[in-house]
Image (tube, rainbow, N blue to C red):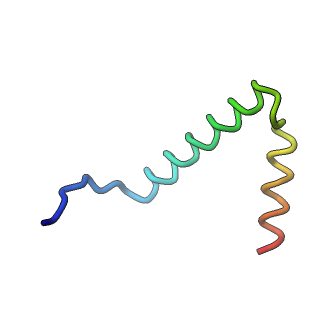
Amino acid sequence: MAKNKPKRELSEEVDLLDTMLTSLVELLEEKGIVTQAEWENRIKQRIRIK
């Protein structure tokens, strides 16, 4: 049984993930859990590690 899922282009997937992450970080920032600067620093640390 094959499922008929609509296939998205890679660029659409990347855009969707970007929107999801941006929304999550904005929500966390509104709640005082993380700042944009902290988020950016975390990303930079993770990129350097790999």
Quarter of the figure that contains the N terminus: bottom left
The percent coordinates of residue 37 (x first, y second) are 87, 41
Quarter residue 31 falls in: top right
1 vs 36, nearest the viewer: 1
Q: Quadrant of residue 32?
A: top right
Residue at 64% in and 37% down: 24
Number of marks drawn: 0
Residue lying at 80% horizontally and 46% vertically, measured from the top left: 39
User: In the figure, is residue 24 to the left or right of 12?
Assistant: right
Name above or below for residue 46 compared with residue 11: below
Is residue 6 shown left or right of residue 9? left
Seen in the picture, residue 25 relative to 40 is either above or below; the reply is above
Image position, residue 4 (x, y; %): 18, 56
Tell me where residue 20 appears, x and y as whole percent: 56, 41
Residue located at (51% from left, 53% from top): 14
Residue 40 lies, with reference to residue 50, above or below; the image says: above
Q: Residue at x 43, y 59 (%)?
A: 10
Instruction: Tell me where residue 16 appears, x and y as whole percent.
Output: 49, 45
Q: Quarter of the image for the C terminus: give it.
A: bottom right
Q: Is residue 36 above or below residue 30?
A: below
Residue extending furthest toward the left: 1
- Toward the bottom, the furthest residue is 50
